[in-house]
Amino acid sequence: MNIVLLSGGGSGKRLWPLSNDIRSKQFIKIFKTENGDYESMVQRVYRQIKTVDAGATVTIATSKTQVSAIHNQLGEDVGVSVEPCRRDTFSAIVLATAYLHDVQGVGLEESVVVCPVDPYVNYDYFESLKALGEQAAEGEANLVLMGIEPTYPSEKYGYIFPATKEQTSMVDTFKEKPDEETAKSYIAQGALWNGGVFAYKLKYVMDKAHELIDFIDYADLFDKYETLTKISFDYAVVEKEPKIQVMRFAGERKDLGTWNTLTEAMDEPTIGESVLNETCANVNVINELNVPIVCMGLKNVIVSASPEGILVSDREQSSYIKPIVDKIEQQIMFAEKSWGSFRVIDVDESSLTIKVTLNPGHSMNYHSHQRRDEIWNVISGEGTVIVDGMEQPVKTGDVVTMRAGCRHTISAMTELKLIEVQLGEEISVHDKQKFELET
């Protein structure tokens, strides 16, 4: 199975304070695994795909801001099709398809399945995705869509009207997202939810792409990406395609886009250090801070704490968080990178203190800053530091000082944790120049 997972960026405001501009909801670790650890939505989906089809080629179509988090959580083996900028779903799918063909070596006659990166589903969903790809390979239709059996009159889905009641049917027509009363009538007529999941032969989308875009191959398309017209895959392809089939899916599928829906999927009422007394009812706590949270006498409340902030909300009101958080301007306090992670400990007028964790075998970029000094205090692990070309080993307890303008990097032999103190009158993420490290 060749599968493209669409990983949209989003502002990360609906699940504040756990999500932010660079940590989207799919990277929040709230699902408990068999060994007692926690995994994120993207880790859960990736694991489920590989369980159903160990040989699946998985490619994540995403923006530059998510690449580090993807590699941090899934490793280096997963394919990543990086959009240089946002150009809607048609361009993203075409770029990912060209990546599959030109970089991953997927043949033109092979089928590709496209779906969102963050559905909360069981294994039957991925068995259906595999069947969707197999149906596309048959060539009876140019597109094969998943039609989800509706469980309520939803206003957030478009609707697919199948021509017959068979498991796999030609599509009669599509309808846009309706109001609730219209949705009820659609369901009464046998319509299915359109969850944005579909399959096609790779050649089909590449031919469509060449009809609409003047490009040679993946590299050429990547270079021209900023000039592409913003248009959705539905408008560019689906609405114009006469040969479309739909396959029914009746399994469980949830959209965990709000605090209310997310906490409903938690295996336990609390994550992190927390205490709820016996008078609490229907309370969820997610705590990423190293301090306890005590709840007493609360009913129907969600509490979430991270380095970004603290949320205490009535369940119903939690759905209306975005316009409030939109008014908050703050520095990113936590992020996962391909090399590890960082957490801001303290922000002052002329200093910034950060706890950095480097994964074994990884290193920072070789870089310098013009307007700040830095001090690294190694608190655990072993590694190597290079400052202005001079290399030396470091271990727990060592301190390294870099003046402004010094080129520096650090590599981890074991997991390496350090406290980084930045000192300067103008500390900015833009004050960084990268260099090639001479070997």
Image (spheres, grey):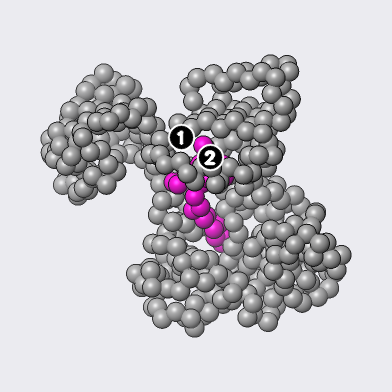
Query: How many residues crowd around disc 2 within 10 Å: few (fewer than 14), some, or many (20 or more)?
Result: many
Amino acid found under the numbered disc labelled 1: Glu
Q: Residue 317 shows which numbered tag?
A: none
- Left or right: 415, with 142 as reference point: left
Q: Give percent across and percent down for residue 188.
A: 87, 65
Magenta-span inclusion, residue 118: no
Q: Using the image as rendered, state which of residue 336 and residue 346 is in the foreground.
A: 346
| Image quarter of residue 263 | top right
Instruction: Point out the stretch of residues depicted in magenta.
Output: 1-23
For disc 2, the marked residue is 16
Q: Give percent across and percent down for residue 191.
A: 80, 66
Q: Give percent across and percent down for residue 194.
A: 70, 64
For disc 1, the marked residue is 308
Q: Residue placed at 69% from the left, 39% from the top?
A: 316
Q: Residue placed at 26% from the left, 18% from the top?
A: 397
Q: Main secondary structure of the magenta part?
A: loop
| Image quarter of residue 246 | bottom right
Q: Using the image as rendered, state which of residue 79 and residue 301 is in the foreground.
A: 301
Outermost residue on the top side: it is: 277
Q: Are marks 1 and 2 in contact (CB under 8 Å)?
A: yes
- Left or right: 414, with 52 as reference point: left
Q: Residue placed at 41% from the left, 81% from the top?
A: 214
Query: How many residues crowd around disc 1 within 10 Å: few (fewer than 14), some, or many (20 or more)?
Result: some
